[in-house]
Image: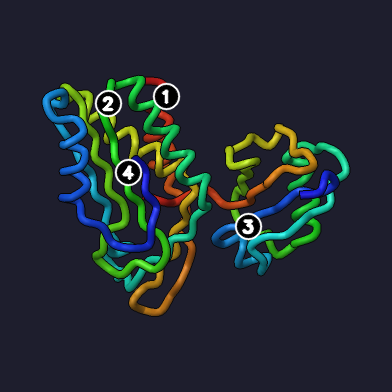
Amino acid sequence: MVIVQEADFNEAELVAQLRERTAGKAGSIVTFTGYVRDYASNKTTQSLYLDHYPGMCEREIESICATAQTRWNTLGAVVMHRVGELRYKEKIVFIAVACAHRGDAFNACQYIIDALKTRAPFWKRETLASGERFWVQQHEADFVKATQWESD
Amino acid sequence: MSGAAIKVLYFAQVAELVQVRQESWPLMQAVTGAAWLRQLESRYPQLAPARRLKLAVNQRHIAHDMLIAPGDEVAVFEPVTGG
């Protein structure tokens, strides 16, 4: 299940829905939550704006989840990603993955966030407490992490 | 969408630089992504500060040697930064 929305979300409800769908089969559910944080230790963030490509975001994340299902036998996955104006400390993204075994669930969850960061068409614009505003550039490390999954 | 044009979508910093989110672009025959990007950069020289322009065609990422054809939806953007 992939959801892209402006509104905040309740992680516990999303996990409960996944649990209901997979209970008895899934021995583990692994989750990841991403939050708005300071851009750097000396650059305090005030807010984050997320632009996105409606339709393509959902399509890319569905494709990423399908790959995770093939590689790690996921029994279910939930990806929630917010867009629009997000305030400091708010949630940005949530991923929950259900698998029979924990090793697969950890790997699938990490793969999904790593692949999402390099493939799903979202773009962050930072507004710092100082008033400075800029579009975030993709980190080389994120690209390296995502490509490592292809060779593993 | 008429057969002799593409629908072009701009996102994030690219949209700010060209000051438009969406437009129709005349295209009579298929061209490579690289060739079309040269047309784009010639029409919008203000794109120079944008690093590493990426393309998606009909909501799929494409390499710059792949073709863009009349009727396609083409998106232009910098490397994604979600998550």
Question: Pointers 3 and 4 in contact (CB under 8 A)?
Answer: no
Judging by the rendered image, the residue that carries numbered circle 3 is B10
Q: Is residue B26 left or right of residue A70?
A: right
User: Mark number for residue A74?
Assistant: 2
Chain under numbered label 4: A
Chain to which the residue tagged by mark 1 belongs: A
Q: Which residue is mark 1?
A: A150
Q: Are marks 1 and 2 in contact (CB under 8 Å)?
A: no
Q: Are marks 4 and 2 in contact (CB under 8 Å)?
A: no
Name the mark on residue A1: none
Say what amino acid the circle numbered 1 marks. Glu
Q: Is A1 above or below relative to A46?
A: above
Distance Cα–Cα, label 4 vs label 2: 13 Å
Q: Amino acid at mark 3?
A: Tyr
Numbered disc 4: secondary structure: strand
Verify CB contact (< 8 Å) between mark 1 and mark 4.
Answer: no
Of the two numbered discs 1 and 2 in the rendering, the one whose residue sits closer to the viewer: 2
Q: Position of residue A100 (x, y in %)?
A: 17, 22
Q: Nearer the viewer, mark 2 or mark 3?
A: 2
- The x and y percentages for residue B6 are 76, 48
The tag earlier along the polypeptide, 1 or 4, is 4
Query: Residue drawn at (40%, 71%), measured in percent from left and top?
Result: A127
